[in-house]
Amino acid sequence: MKKDSKIAVFISTCMIIAGILMFLYVLPFLYIWASFGESENQNKLDLMKKSVTFSIFKFQKIYTMNSALASLVLTKDYYTVIGYYKELEKLDAVDEGNTYLAVYSYIQTGEYDNALKYSQLFGNKGQQAQIYIKMKDFKKAKILVNEMLNQTPVKPKVYRYKAEIEMGENKWKEANLSIDKALKYSPNSMEALQDKVRISKHLGYKEEYKKNLNKLKLLELKRGNI
């Protein structure tokens, strides 16, 4: 083979390899970009999962998994969130944002030991309080909630945590006062409304029960949960 022919073959081979590498580089991001126009549905999830599947390089995996986490949580695909988080942990790419979503997913799946372990990485007192409430360790939950109540400003969800502790301690009237504070500052919080419905039912407040149950159903309908 002539020297010029060898050079031409070499150049052609290099161009083909470069094209393949460029395609592999771009492919995961194409799936991410395609998902941007989708609502939170199965098609969007499929596109995001494909973006992770076709990620080869470390930076691709980190970007695509982080991009998918929020949508996965919104669609309650908690086990996939946990799986991606474990992969991010192996890649030394955990941060406060993806840890928050992973802890939330661990709470939803009832894996409280793991939830507590990872919530302590960035000292998220709110999530730790939720976990202790789920574990019925109200003493530890109360310590955290009291610390958050002494902060300024107090986040509305802290009053919800307080109400849930009081429910656990069978202090239903106190819980009603606390949940009313939560709803005063965050009237469309589904979690707070769920607690309010439960408290109103327990206390026999029929009008409050019906009013808040109807509001809760309306919010669930608007958000596509029913």
Image (spheres, grey):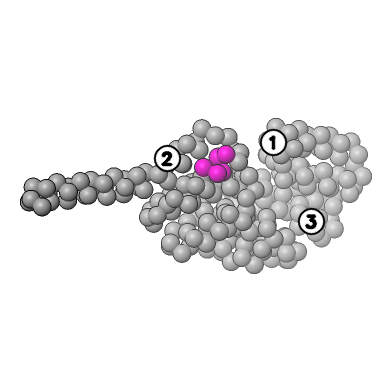
> In front here: 135 or 151?
135
Amino acid carrying label 3: it is Glu
Picture coordinates of residue 50, whole percent (x, y): 49, 47
Amino acid carrying label 2: it is Leu
Q: Quadrant of the C terminus?
A: top right
The reply to whether callout 3 and callout 1 are in contact (CB within 8 Å) is no
Residue matched to label 3: 166
**Crowding at mark 1 (Cα within 10 Å: few <14, some 14-19, many 20+):** few
Mark closest to the chain's N terminus, 3 or 1 = 3
Task: Tell me the mark number nearer the camera, choosing from 3 and 1.
Answer: 1
Q: Is residue 177 left or right of residue 33?
A: right
Picture coordinates of residue 101, whole percent (x, y): 57, 52
Residue drawn at (69%, 60%) of the image: 110
Mark closest to the chain's N terminus, 1 or 2 = 2
Is residue 44 covered in magenta? yes
Which residues lie in the magenta part? Answer: 43-47
Picture coordinates of residue 94, whole percent (x, y): 47, 58
Cα–Cα gap, marks 3 and 2: 49 Å
Q: Which mark is residue 30?
A: 2
Prevailing secondary structure of the magenta residues: helix
Q: Is residue 190 left or right of residue 214?
A: left
